Image: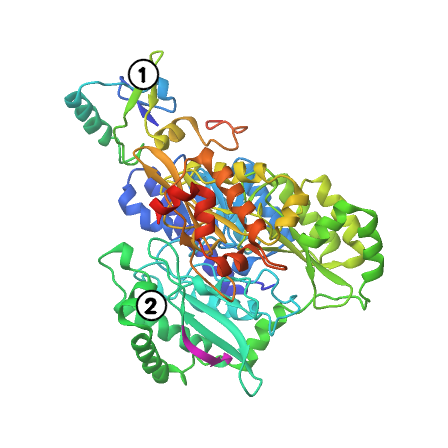
């Protein structure tokens, strides 16, 4: 799940909030952490680059998290 | 097959009701993830990269067709239409929804299957030889003792909070198909000088970050003392095992730190104190359990050597499958059929719900309704009439379940890796896919002969990479996946940990490296040698040179 600018949650990384300011990132992380009790487990910041304006994770782990397994690609991650 | 009694049913039912309440409290926000984690782990529920994962026990790898159909149903209704069989003979569902898990557990309980102790710091599913009760070289069916230990260890109050997880494997045959030497306790049945069957007890084996081959703690243990001896080992571990450092908490660490002689002394002292207690297994209780594993009603048949030879001569593809996927049965006229879950390019150990149903139907039609799961992530029909082999092979082939590669290079053991697992550092299944595509020619595979490849996506070693003839370990270096290769591992009755070949390779370099290793082996092998035999004779250097080139081999040394 990705945190949105409207401080909600979305399964799509494209709708996730991209921040280039460390202080603002920490502030939003703190907000996200207040959602922990029910909606999410252990929110954290990930590094992304922008490709054609769309966020793409730098770490493979986060890319797989965002786009699903690289095997069994016949299955939609979010059916 | 073991059937639950009224206590089992009551206990499992109560456990599910309890977990249903816990899930409800978690979903209502009354429990935090930190509070909930130990509760879900006690019921086999992990939180992975994309979703919750549910691990379901297949005790000692034995399933009825009814149970397999239920596993298919769970995959179809609650998951994404498939399941993954693991190196612990269990099945994992990778897309479980937490709110549905209690319903899944109830469905499983209706066919006497549970997820209790499939995770957590307790005695896990007790694993065994997939040919148990049918192998020609077997002394006794090890599942009787697995079941005894299962009943003893499930929800045992003293051993529910061990320093770390605890794995036990049992083999009843001298040829070890259960990898007992890489378990916390390995039990290897053999006869003493008087000809009485008992157990060689091994302790302190394990892979992971600090791999060890187990030590023999007792050469021969009378069967009636099995529970007392296991209890003594567990009690000493529970007292001395480290709880301050998760990486040093397994029994292998304490055994190797204090030394096997000292550990033995402590265990033997404890054993002496408890061996004549009610822990001594009464013969009638063993007989009671034995009856559940009584052989099916075999027909009196002759071996079909000539008829099979004719069919094999006439049909090369059938012959190839017989050579690799069919094993000898102890009863004349019958055979053991291995169903490879390693079709070229497919994730090892994965099987769809439809194929699970189809295998269940074939088990009913051809093999007394019983299915086995091997720790090498294949399925087995253990009681097939030799006269049915040709027909069964056709049916398996139509289902793409007759890949003739069991025991060969593309029968790859592989963990789910970074595609699913939160612990992994690298993907493992795509590496298996690339290797199996590279070695797609079955004639060549047969020419290469017995060969094991084991792949793990991190050092936790769920893919048992240390004991593959070739082991492949995925590592992460600055957000790039690399793969370290080891050679010479083995988990049979002559166990060994692999030796590291050299620097890690990129994923796209792995098939070529495998090709170099295989070509070098074919060049060097003497008559009748498997890869492992050649490796043991010539050592690592020729393979290092083959993969890295001479100059790089010196640098890597």
Instruction: Specify the subunit that label 1 lies on.
Output: A
> B392 or B430: nearer the eye?
B430
Q: Is residue B219 in the magenta section?
A: yes
Q: Residue at x 35, y 30 (%)?
A: A62
Does residue B346 sit above or below B124 in this rendering? above
Residue span colored magenta: B216-223
| SS assignment at label 2 | helix
- Percent across and percent down for residue B304 are 82, 61
| Magenta stretch, main secondary structure class | strand
Q: Residue at x 40, y 83 (%)?
A: B275
Task: Tell me how far mark 1 sits from mark 2, CA to CA.
Answer: 54 Å
Count every numbered label the image shows and give the total: 2
Pointer 2 residue: B158
* Disc 1 + disc 2, Cβ < 8 Å: no
- Percent across and percent down for residue B436 are 57, 40
Q: Nearer the viewer, mark 1 or mark 2?
A: 1
B23 vs B134, left or right, is left
Query: Do the residues marked 1 and 2 share a common chain?
Result: no
Camera sees residue B130: yes
> B221 or B471: nearer the eye?
B471
Instruction: Specify the subunit that label 2 lies on.
Output: B
Q: Callout 2 environment at 10 Å: few (<14), some (14 to 19), or many (20+)?
A: few
A35 vs B5, left or right, is left
- Percent across and percent down for residue B490 are 49, 59
Q: Is residue B256 in the magenta section?
A: no
Quarter of the figure that contains the N terminus of chain B: bottom right
Q: Residue furthest left?
A: A23
Label of residue A50 in the image: 1
Camera sees residue B424: no
């Amino acid at each position: 799940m990705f945190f949105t600018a409207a401080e909600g949650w979305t399964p799509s990384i494209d709708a996730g909030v991209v921040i280039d300011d460390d202080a603002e990132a920490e502030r939003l992380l703190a907000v996200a952490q207040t959602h922990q009790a029910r909606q999410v487990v252990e929110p954290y910041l990930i590094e992304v680059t922008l490709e054609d304006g769309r966020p793409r994770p730098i770490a493979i782990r986060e890319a797989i998290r965002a786009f699903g397994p690289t095997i069994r690609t016949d299955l939609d991650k979010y059916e | 097959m073991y059937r639950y009694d009224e206590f089992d049913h009551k206990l499992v039912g109560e456990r599910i009701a309890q977990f249903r309440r816990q899930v409800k409290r978690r979903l209502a926000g009354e429990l935090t993830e930190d509070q909930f984690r130990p509760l879900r782990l006690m019921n086999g529920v992990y939180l992975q990269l994309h979703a919750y994962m549910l691990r379901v026990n297949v005790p000692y790898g034995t399933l009825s067709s009814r149970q397999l159909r239920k596993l298919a149903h769970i995959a179809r209704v609650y998951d994404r239409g498939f399941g993954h069989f693991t190196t612990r003979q269990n099945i994992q569902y990778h897309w479980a929804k937490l709110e549905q898990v209690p319903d899944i557990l109830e469905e499983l309980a209706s066919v006497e299957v549970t997820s209790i102790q499939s995770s957590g710091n307790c005695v896990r599913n007790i694993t065994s030889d997939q040919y148990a009760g049918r192998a020609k070289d077997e002394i006794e069916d090890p599942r009787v003792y697995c079941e005894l230990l299962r009943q003893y260890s499930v929800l045992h109050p003293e051993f529910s909070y061990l320093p770390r997880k605890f794995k036990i494997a049992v083999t009843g045959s001298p040829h070890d198909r259960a990898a007992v030497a890489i378990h916390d306790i390995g039990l290897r049945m053999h006869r003493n000088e008087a000809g009485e069957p008992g157990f060689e007890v091994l302790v302190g084996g394990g892979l992971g970050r600090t791999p060890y081959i187990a030590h023999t703690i007792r050469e021969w243990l009378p069967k009636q003392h099995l529970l007392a001896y296991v209890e003594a080992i567990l009690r000493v571990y529970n007292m001395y095992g480290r709880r301050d450092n998760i990486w040093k908490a397994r029994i292998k660490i304490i055994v190797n730190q204090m030394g096997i002689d000292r550990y033995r002394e402590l265990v033997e002292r404890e054993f002496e104190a408890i061996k004549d207690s009610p822990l001594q297994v009464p013969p009638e209780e063993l007989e009671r359990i034995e009856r559940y594993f009584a052989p099916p009603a075999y027909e009196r048949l002759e071996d079909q050597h000539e008829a099979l030879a004719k069919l094999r001569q006439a049909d090369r593809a059938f012959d190839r499958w017989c050579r690799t996927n069919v094993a000898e049965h102890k009863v004349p006229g019958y055979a053991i059929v291995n169903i490879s879950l390693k079709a070229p390019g497919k994730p090892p150990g994965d099987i769809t719900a439809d194929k699970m149903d189809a295998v269940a139907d074939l088990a009913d039609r051809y093999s007394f309704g019983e299915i086995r799961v091997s720790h090498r992530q294949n399925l087995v029909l253990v009681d097939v009439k030799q006269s049915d082999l040709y027909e069964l092979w056709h049916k398996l082939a139509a289902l793409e379940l007759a890949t003739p590669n069991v025991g060969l290079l593309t029968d790859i053991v592989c963990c789910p890796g970074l595609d699913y697992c939160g612990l992994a550092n690298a993907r493992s299944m795509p590496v298996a896919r690339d290797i199996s595509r590279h070695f797609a020619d079955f004639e060549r595979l047969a020419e290469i002969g017995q060969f094991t490849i084991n792949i793990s996506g991190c050092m936790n070693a769920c893919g048992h990479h240390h004991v593959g003839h070739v082991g492949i370990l995925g590592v992460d270096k600055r957000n790039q996946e690399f793969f370290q290769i080891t050679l010479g591992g083995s988990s049979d009755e002559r166990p060994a940990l692999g030796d590291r070949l050299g620097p890690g390779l990129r994923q796209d370099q792995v098939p070529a490296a495998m090709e170099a290793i295989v070509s070098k082996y074919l060049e060097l092998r003497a008559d009748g040698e498997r890869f492992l035999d050649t490796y043991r004779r010539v050592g690592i250097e020729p393979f290092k040179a083959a993969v890295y080139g001479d100059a790089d081999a010196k640098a890597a040394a």
